[in-house]
Image: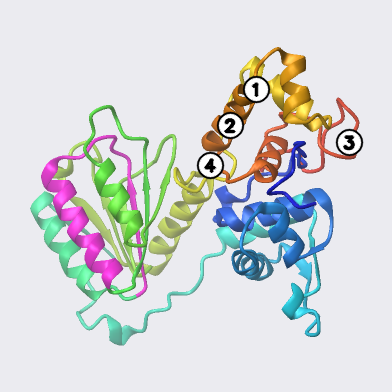
Amino acid sequence: MAGGDRVALTLGRAVPSLVRWGVSADADLVYRCLASFGPQCAGDVADDLGLAVRRVRVALDELVEAGLVQGGRDPVARGAGGGSWQAVAPDEAVDALRRRAFRVPAPAITDRAWPEPVPPPTRLLPDLCATRERIARLVALERGEHLAMHPEQAFSADTLAIGSAIDADLLGRRVRVRSLGLPPADGDRSSAYTAEFVRLGGEYRLADRLPHKMMVFDRRVALVAVDPLDLDRGSWEFTDPAAVESLVTLFVRQWSGATDPRRNGVPTVVLTQREKAVVALLADGHTDATAAKQLGMSTRTLTYTLRGLMDRFGVENRFQLGLALGAMRAGTPPGVPAGEPGEGDESP
């Protein structure tokens, strides 16, 4: 099934998107390929997806760690793709990812990494100045992970300047930084900051709404704004382990339901009537030329239509496009009669 040069469009099964559960875009595509077309070795998956074998193997390692694929451990076949890999059922995959998302690991930071005296379990930082001073002190102590939730749709220039400096410092020290935000409002100046944050290695997701403005430092200390719409009212600081753990669980739940605007493997896209017709004909086995003739358009126009779809879905070739289209049920997946739901139709 060499995917890079195929003319027809092969639709994948409607399996849930794994990206929303923290799986990378490459791993999501590899899982879709195996779930749609059955067991394959890494080399065949790479050919189908038009990806380098190295990228597929990295994705398979991620899927193995998450318990989403099985097999492929034949040491003799390793050089030629590592044996045959098989995806677990989509409902099992989602259950495994849910369990992983809501499991709160023990803090990886030892007490010696936090030399300052432990403050009371809860205390009020009375204003924005006190909050910023406390953030600076806590950031200097961080060694493992920084979680941030921002329910604002626009940020002031000084907030962006302070935030970018903090993130650059943390990422430069190889601290994992995960940031949750809302889609920016028109005219918001945070786009360039977000692009730089991702370039430096930060992880960023968008949600429709967020319950609090907060930061969690190494899963030991949490700051929650008294009023997210008026930061001058200060913040509550929590150091009680149970309280911090509950806030981490809240963050993970929101993170799992949010989307990565740059790595969302299966975005919600509404197809035009022309796009639906092109997809249907190519999925039925037509070539570009015969599909274009039947639709009364030029082959070049049909090619541009497909290229536009690939750009909108963020995929690299027709095979990957077929997997994405199958996921959003834009056509009938292989082996499933028309009108019958595909495996994994239920959204997680």
Q: Does label 3 or label 4 sit earlier along the sequence?
A: 4
Q: Do residues under tags 4 and 1 come within 8 Å of each other at their CB atoms?
A: no
Q: Which residue is mark 4?
A: 314
Q: Nearer the viewer, mark 3 or mark 2?
A: 2
Q: Is residue 161 magenta?
A: yes
The amino acid type of the residue labelled 1 equals Glu
How many other residues sit within 10 Å of disc 1, few (<14), some (14-19) or many (≥20)?
A: some
Distance between the Cα atoms at labels 1 and 3? 21 Å
Q: Is residue 325 above or below residue 112?
A: above
Q: Which residue is mark 1?
A: 275
Q: Do residues under tags 3 and 2 come within 8 Å of each other at their CB atoms?
A: no
Q: Do residues under tags 1 and 2 come within 8 Å of each other at their CB atoms?
A: yes
Spot occupied by residue 7 in the image (x, y as percentages of width and height): 74, 38
Q: Is residue 162 magenta?
A: yes
Tag 4's secondary structure?
A: loop
Range of magenta residues: 144-172
